[in-house]
């Protein structure tokens, strides 16, 4: 591989965070370019670097990849985090897609108007507790350490990211889910993930006012 | 594939249509079970057939698969095709009938703008650059099927939307004539019509939206 993957995005979680997680979990070092002004973004577009004029952008293996899911899929396949065969891949895809729906709610939350925030938070809590977490609690009940094929995969990385993100908003959310609590501890102690969870890693903090302002400034039409 | 895939969804396009397209273009016969009432959906949920309580659901190879992208990916891999997405665009078009009347016109204008300035130019250029009949590797792939579906949906929004894209016009003509696709485009196939008032009402009732 010619050099490290290079990520271009705002200096915050957004849609790039799952990519940072997956690369980190795979033990892959990467570089980051942060978009801070509208001019930077417009230059990228003018240079023809963004296929659909959007970020995330990940330069990897000679490609300028866009579209988060395509990027994650490529990384998962490359680093053997995508199951051992097509059926395991299908299972990983299902789990990841479901979790992504939940993460999408969290992603847009900071940008919702103040009067809608309480309702949206309730929605997140309801979906996490009643729709998504029960599924994975049940999968893990069989006494395995990982979600698919008893081997560490993209699905495990996506789930631990989601658990931590939801807990930031709803601290006691895992209280009815003993398997997920154990899963969270196990994952957090895996060497690559443990490193990612320490201060100074590329992991980004939750969005704050300043981040929201920057994003709106760069992308608002 | 062992036995025919069975699709569970409402009797309209929605998120299942891309799956119907892919199966049809690949010449794979499939069965459909339509959700017509709220009770139908409840039954599927209570049977534990829906992993995240949502449809589309496709019974295939002994699995009850959910999540559209996962399903498409599995099918494409099995038939040795692969994918690039026009999903964002089709998502916008799909939700249009469900928008309140006062924002519909604005959203339609936005869709047309996105299609003509963001999406179609990319595919027009790809076809121009390599001069082949198909988008990738000069062989039919999911990317071509998805693009044809997107073109036809966009034309339903604005009939002359391809006017500035001669290569896409030629692409549309060629791809529509592929036997399996031609068959799918004929009346009586499993292709669904665009959402009408009646369909919107049924969906709202079943899913409580």
Image (tube, helix red, strand yellow):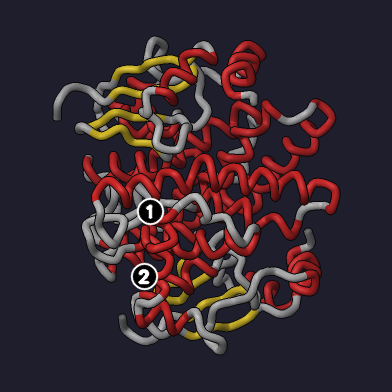
Residue designated by label 2:
B174
| Residue at 63% in and 64% down | B156
Q: Toward which corner of the image does residue B110 lie, by quadrant? A: top right
Q: How many labels does the image show?
A: 2
Give the percent coordinates (x, y) of residue B201: 80, 69
**Front disc: 2 or 1:** 2
Could you say which is closer to the camera, residue B29 or residue A40?
A40
| Residue at 27% in and 55% down | B136
The chain letter for the residue carrying disc 2 is B
Q: What secondary structure is marked by label 1? A: helix
B164 versus B158 height, above or below: above
- The reply to whether residue B192 is visible in this rendering is yes
Q: In the image, A58: left or right of B19?
A: left
Give the percent coordinates (x, y) of residue A87: 31, 64
Could you say which is closer to the camera, residue A121 or residue A45?
A45
Q: What secondary structure is marked by label 2? A: helix
Q: In the image, A62: left or right of A11?
A: left
- The reply to whether residue A189 is visible in this rendering is no
Could you say which is closer to the camera, residue A69 or residue A25?
A69
A88 versus B106 height, above or below: below
Q: In the image, B46: left or right of A86?
A: right
Whole-angstrom CA distance, mark 2 to mark 1, is: 36 Å
**Split into 4 quadrants, where in the image is the C terminus of chain B?**
bottom right
Q: Tag 2: Cα neighbours inside 10 Å, few (<14), some, or many (≥20)?
A: few
| Residue at 46% in and 30% down | A55
Label at residue A92 = 1
B51 versus B3 height, above or below: above
Give the percent coordinates (x, y) of residue A199: 41, 11
């Amino acid at each position: 591989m010619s050099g490290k993957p290079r990520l271009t995005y705002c200096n915050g979680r957004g849609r790039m965070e799952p990519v940072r997680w997956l690369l980190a979990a795979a033990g892959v070092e990467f570089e980051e370019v942060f978009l801070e002004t509208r001019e930077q973004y417009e230059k990228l577009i003018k240079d023809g670097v963004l296929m659909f004029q959007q970020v995330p952008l990940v330069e990897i293996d000679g490609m300028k990849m866009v579209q988060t899911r395509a990027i994650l899929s490529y990384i998962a396949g490359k680093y053997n985090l995508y199951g051992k065969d097509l059926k395991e891949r299908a299972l990983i895809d299902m789990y990841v897609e479901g979790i992504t729906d939940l993460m999408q709610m969290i992603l847009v939350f900071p940008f919702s108007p103040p009067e809608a925030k309480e309702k949206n938070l309730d929605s997140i809590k309801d979906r996490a507790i009643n729709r998504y977490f029960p599924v994975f609690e049940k999968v893990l009940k069989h006494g395995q350490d990982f979600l698919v094929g008893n081997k560490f995969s993209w699905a495990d990385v996506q789930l631990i990211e989601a658990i931590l993100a939801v807990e930031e908003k709803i601290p006691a959310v895992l209280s009815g889910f003993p398997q997920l609590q154990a899963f969270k501890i196990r994952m957090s102690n895996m060497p690559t993930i443990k490193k990612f969870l320490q201060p100074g890693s590329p992991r980004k903090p939750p969005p704050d006012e300043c981040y929201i302002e920057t994003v709106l400034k760069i992308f608002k039409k | 594939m062992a036995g025919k895939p069975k699709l569970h969804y409402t009797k309209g396009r929605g998120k299942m249509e891309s799956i119907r397209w892919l199966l049809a273009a690949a010449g794979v016969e499939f069965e459909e079970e339509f959700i017509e009432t709220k009770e139908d959906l409840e039954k599927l949920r209570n049977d534990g057939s829906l992993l995240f309580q949502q449809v589309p659901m496709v019974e295939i190879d002994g699995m009850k698969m959910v999540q559209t992208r996962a399903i498409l990916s599995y099918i494409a891999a099995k038939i040795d095709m692969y994918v690039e997405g026009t999903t964002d665009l089709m998502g916008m078009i799909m939700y249009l009938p469900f928008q309140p009347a006062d924002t519909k016109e604005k959203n339609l204008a936005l869709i047309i703008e996105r299609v003509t300035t963001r999406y179609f130019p990319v595919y027009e250029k790809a076809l121009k650059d390599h001069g082949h009949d198909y988008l990738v590797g000069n062989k039919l792939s999911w990317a071509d099927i998805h693009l044809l579906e997107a073109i036809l949906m966009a034309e339903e929004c604005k009939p002359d939307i391809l006017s500035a894209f001669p290569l896409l016009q030629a692409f549309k003509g060629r791809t529509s004539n592929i036997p399996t696709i031609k068959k799918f485009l004929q009346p009586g196939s499993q292709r669904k019509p665009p959402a009408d008032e009646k369909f919107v009402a049924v969906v709202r009732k079943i899913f409580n939206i």
